[in-house]
Amino acid sequence: MAVPRITREDLKRLLDAGDGSVAGTPAPTPVIVDVRLKYPYEHSTIMLPGAIRMAPGASDGTVLPRDRDIVLYDSDPEELVAESTARVLIRSGFRVLVLEGGIAGWAAAKFATDRKSAPQLAVPVSGLSRG
Protein backbone atom coordinates (compact mmCIF):
# COMPACT_ATOMS: atom_id res chain seq x y z
CA MET A 1 0.00 0.00 0.00
CA ALA A 2 1.39 3.38 -1.00
CA VAL A 3 1.31 5.90 1.81
CA PRO A 4 0.46 9.47 0.72
CA ARG A 5 3.09 12.15 1.37
CA ILE A 6 2.90 15.90 1.94
CA THR A 7 5.73 18.33 1.28
CA ARG A 8 6.94 20.65 3.99
CA GLU A 9 5.88 23.63 1.86
CA ASP A 10 2.32 22.32 1.50
CA LEU A 11 2.09 21.56 5.22
CA LYS A 12 3.42 25.02 6.09
CA ARG A 13 0.74 26.59 3.85
CA LEU A 14 -1.95 24.58 5.65
CA LEU A 15 -0.65 25.60 9.06
CA ASP A 16 -0.24 29.25 8.03
CA ALA A 17 -3.83 29.35 6.77
CA GLY A 18 -4.89 28.56 10.33
CA ASP A 19 -8.06 26.75 9.33
CA GLY A 20 -6.47 24.39 6.82
CA SER A 21 -7.96 26.17 3.80
CA VAL A 22 -5.95 26.17 0.60
CA ALA A 23 -6.91 28.13 -2.50
CA GLY A 24 -10.17 29.21 -0.92
CA THR A 25 -11.33 25.69 -0.12
CA PRO A 26 -12.00 25.41 3.62
CA ALA A 27 -10.65 22.39 5.44
CA PRO A 28 -9.77 21.77 9.08
CA THR A 29 -6.13 22.15 10.05
CA PRO A 30 -4.40 18.76 10.05
CA VAL A 31 -3.35 17.09 13.27
CA ILE A 32 0.45 16.89 13.41
CA VAL A 33 1.83 13.78 15.12
CA ASP A 34 5.44 13.16 16.13
CA VAL A 35 6.25 9.45 15.79
CA ARG A 36 10.03 9.63 16.16
CA LEU A 37 11.74 6.71 17.84
CA LYS A 38 12.32 7.15 21.58
CA TYR A 39 15.97 8.26 21.52
CA PRO A 40 15.68 10.83 18.69
CA TYR A 41 12.52 12.23 20.29
CA GLU A 42 13.89 12.44 23.82
CA HIS A 43 17.20 13.99 22.76
CA SER A 44 15.73 16.67 20.54
CA THR A 45 14.63 20.12 21.65
CA ILE A 46 12.19 20.81 18.81
CA MET A 47 8.84 19.61 17.50
CA LEU A 48 6.64 20.79 14.66
CA PRO A 49 4.20 23.51 15.77
CA GLY A 50 1.29 22.07 17.73
CA ALA A 51 2.46 18.47 17.30
CA ILE A 52 1.29 15.75 19.64
CA ARG A 53 3.44 12.78 20.59
CA MET A 54 2.52 9.22 19.73
CA ALA A 55 4.77 6.19 20.08
CA PRO A 56 5.88 4.71 16.74
CA GLY A 57 3.56 1.99 15.50
CA ALA A 58 0.87 2.93 18.00
CA SER A 59 -2.60 2.32 16.75
CA ASP A 60 -4.56 3.94 19.55
CA GLY A 61 -7.03 5.84 17.45
CA THR A 62 -8.90 7.19 20.46
CA VAL A 63 -6.67 10.27 20.61
CA LEU A 64 -6.89 11.03 16.88
CA PRO A 65 -9.85 12.57 15.07
CA ARG A 66 -11.37 10.76 12.13
CA ASP A 67 -12.68 13.95 10.53
CA ARG A 68 -9.28 15.60 9.95
CA ASP A 69 -6.11 14.77 8.06
CA ILE A 70 -3.30 13.45 10.22
CA VAL A 71 0.29 14.28 9.29
CA LEU A 72 2.97 12.02 10.75
CA TYR A 73 6.66 12.84 10.91
CA ASP A 74 9.79 11.20 12.22
CA SER A 75 13.55 11.76 12.17
CA ASP A 76 14.36 9.20 9.47
CA PRO A 77 15.19 10.81 6.09
CA GLU A 78 13.32 7.95 4.40
CA GLU A 79 10.28 8.39 6.70
CA LEU A 80 10.30 4.66 7.53
CA VAL A 81 8.86 4.98 11.03
CA ALA A 82 6.16 7.42 9.96
CA GLU A 83 5.28 5.28 6.95
CA SER A 84 4.93 2.14 9.08
CA THR A 85 2.71 3.95 11.59
CA ALA A 86 0.69 5.49 8.75
CA ARG A 87 -0.09 2.06 7.32
CA VAL A 88 -1.53 0.94 10.65
CA LEU A 89 -3.69 4.07 10.95
CA ILE A 90 -4.85 3.96 7.33
CA ARG A 91 -6.01 0.37 7.82
CA SER A 92 -8.01 1.64 10.80
CA GLY A 93 -9.78 4.21 8.62
CA PHE A 94 -7.78 7.38 9.30
CA ARG A 95 -6.76 9.94 6.65
CA VAL A 96 -2.98 9.97 7.05
CA LEU A 97 -0.12 11.71 5.25
CA VAL A 98 3.61 11.43 5.93
CA LEU A 99 5.76 14.56 5.95
CA GLU A 100 8.48 14.25 3.30
CA GLY A 101 11.91 14.70 4.86
CA GLY A 102 10.56 14.51 8.40
CA ILE A 103 11.62 16.93 11.08
CA ALA A 104 15.11 17.33 9.59
CA GLY A 105 13.65 18.65 6.32
CA TRP A 106 11.30 20.96 8.21
CA ALA A 107 14.15 22.37 10.32
CA ALA A 108 16.46 22.67 7.29
CA ALA A 109 13.83 24.88 5.63
CA LYS A 110 13.98 27.06 8.78
CA PHE A 111 10.23 26.76 9.33
CA ALA A 112 8.89 27.52 12.80
CA THR A 113 9.17 24.86 15.49
CA ASP A 114 7.97 24.48 19.05
CA ARG A 115 10.55 23.99 21.79
CA LYS A 116 10.55 20.99 24.09
CA SER A 117 12.78 19.87 26.88
CA ALA A 118 15.49 17.29 26.39
CA PRO A 119 17.49 15.37 29.00
CA GLN A 120 20.20 17.39 30.69
CA LEU A 121 23.65 15.95 31.19
CA ALA A 122 24.41 15.13 34.79
CA VAL A 123 27.19 17.13 36.37
CA PRO A 124 30.08 14.80 37.17
CA VAL A 125 30.71 14.30 40.84
CA SER A 126 34.34 14.39 41.88
CA GLY A 127 35.86 11.62 43.96
CA LEU A 128 35.58 11.47 47.71
CA SER A 129 37.51 14.15 49.55
CA ARG A 130 40.50 12.97 51.48
CA GLY A 131 40.76 14.51 54.80
Image: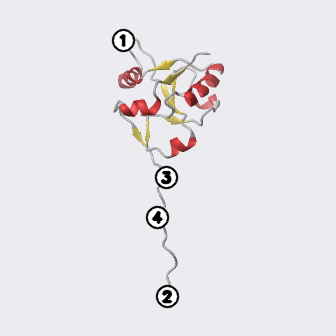
Residue depicted at 60% across the width and 28% down the height = 85
43 is higher (above) or lower (below) than 125: above
Residue hosting label 3: 119
Kind of residue at disc 4: Val
Q: CA distance from mark 1 to mark 4?
A: 54 Å
Q: Which mark is residue 24?
A: 1
| Left or right side of 23 for 2 | right
Residue depicted at 50% across the width and 19% down the height = 5
Question: Which mark sits nearer the N-terminus, 1 or 4?
Answer: 1
Kind of residue at disc 3: Pro
CA neighbours of label 4 inside 10 A, class few (<14), some (14 to 19), many (20+): few
Viewer-side residue, 79 vs 91 = 79
Residue depicted at 63% across the width and 32% down the height = 57
Q: Disc 4, disc 3: CB below 8 Å?
A: no
Question: Which mark sits nearer the N-terminus, 3 or 1?
Answer: 1
Kind of residue at disc 2: Gly
Task: Give the structural element (helix, strand or loop) at label 1.
Answer: loop
Q: Disc 3, disc 2: CB below 8 Å?
A: no
Q: CA distance from mark 3 to mark 2?
A: 35 Å
Across and down, in percent, residue 58 comes to 63, 33
Q: CA distance from mark 1 to mark 2?
A: 77 Å
Q: Which mark is residue 123?
A: 4
Residue hosting label 2: 131
CA neighbours of label 3 inside 10 A, class few (<14), some (14 to 19), many (20+): few
112 is higher (above) or lower (below) than 9: below
Question: Which mark sits nearer the N-terminus, 4 or 2?
Answer: 4
Q: CA distance from mark 4 to mark 3?
A: 12 Å
Residue depicted at 39% across the width and 34% down the height = 107
Viewer-side residue, 105 vs 70 = 105
Q: Disc 1, disc 4: CB below 8 Å?
A: no
Please name which of the two marks, 3 or 2, marks the residue nearer to the observer.
2
